[in-house]
Image (cartoon, rainbow, N blue to C red):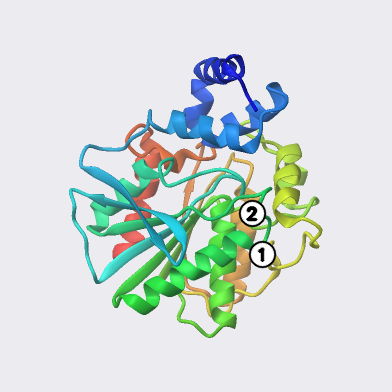
Amino acid sequence: MFGKSSNSSILNFIGRRFDDVVISGNAVAIRLRRELVGATPQQIRGAIEGVSRLNPGRFGGNLDYKEIEGVRCGVVNFQGITNDKKRILWAHGGAFSFGSARVYKATATFLAKALKCEVIIPEYRLAPEFPYPAAIDDLFKVYSSLKQSEQGELFLVGDSAGGNLASCLVSKLIKEKIQVPDKLALLSPWMDLSKKSKSNIQNSSDFSPFDNLDTVAFSRDYMGTMDDKDPLVSPVFGSFKGFPPTHIQGSHVEFLFLDAESTLKAMEADKVQTTTHWESKALHGWHLLPDILPEAKRSMQEVANFLLK
C-alpha cells in the first residue's frame, strides 16, 4: 500500500508532467510505472482519474452512472438531451489497463451535443487483473442489452486499445449472429498486438506518449499466453466481412498510424464501406481534448459528421 509520502510523490509527478497529461492519460500511466517504482495499476488509475478533472468538457455536459448487465457504465448527455432512436457506445482506450468514463467525459460530451443523444461508456474490466476475454465479454453484455432493450440506431466508437476492442466486439457479434452496429468509428486503433507489428518496428514515439517497450508490455498483460497474431486479440489478422460502414482516423506521425493504415487496407479488401480522416501532426490521444486542441475539435467533428450522415 502507498502511504502519504507516496501519494504526494504521485501528485507532484503529475504536476510536473501536465504537458503529458493533455496529450494522453496513458503518458501518466507509463511514466508513473517507469519512474515511480512499485506503483500499482490501481494507484496509477487513481492518479489519471484525478488529472481527468482538469478536462471536464464544455458546460452542460453531464456524466451519470448506471449498471447494464452488471457492468458499470458512464452515461454522458448534453443539457439532459436524450434520444431513444439514437445512441453511441464508446469502447474507451487506455492500453487495456487504464481509462474510464470520467477520462472520456469531454470528448463524449462533444459527440452528445453534436448528435443530441447519449454516449454510453462501459467501464469494462481492466488488465492485468482481468486479461482477455474480460473486456470483450463486458462490452458484449452491454451492447446486447442495449440492442435488445431499445430500438433505433446504435453507433460504436473505439479509440486506441478501445478500437481493438470495438473491432473484436463486431467480429463476435457476427459470429453470434447478432445485428452489428449501424456504424463504427475507429480512432487511432491499436489493431496489431504482435511484437513485430509494423507500428512496433517503426516505433514512432516522438508524437506518442509510449514506445514499443510499452506496447509489448501492455499487450502481454492483456493477452496472457495467447498467440499475439490471434484475430481474437489482433483483429487486423482476421476478417472484416460483414462489418458496418466504418470511419478510421489517425495521425501520420503517431505510433499507431501504421495500424490504422493496415486496418483501412484490410477493410477495403473485405469490401467494407470506409471513410477516413488523417491529421498531419497530432499527438496520440488528441481526441480526448476537443475543447482545447483544434485538431481534436476538427477530428471529433468528422466523427460526428460520419455518424450523422
Up the image or down, 229 lies above or below 215; here it is below
Q: Mark 1 points at which residue?
A: 236
Q: Which residue was labeled with disc 2?
A: 259
Residue 158 appears in the figure: yes
Residue 28 in percent (x, y) is at 57, 29
Indicate which disc, 2 or 1, sits on the residue closer to the N terminus. Answer: 1
| Residue 182 in view (yes/no) | no
Seen in the image, is 94 located left or right of residue 196?
left
Image spot of residue 172 (x, y percent): 58, 75
Q: Which mark is residue 268?
A: none
Q: Say left or right for 188 vs 301.
A: right
The residue under the point 61% across, 45% down is 97
Residue at the (60%, 50%) spot, across then down: 126
User: In the image, is residue 73 above or below residue 7?
Assistant: below
Structural distance between the alpha carbons of marks 2 and 1: 8 Å
Where is the C terminus found, in terms of image quarters? bottom left
Up-down: is 69 above or below 125? below
Of helix, strand and loop, which one carries label 1? Answer: helix
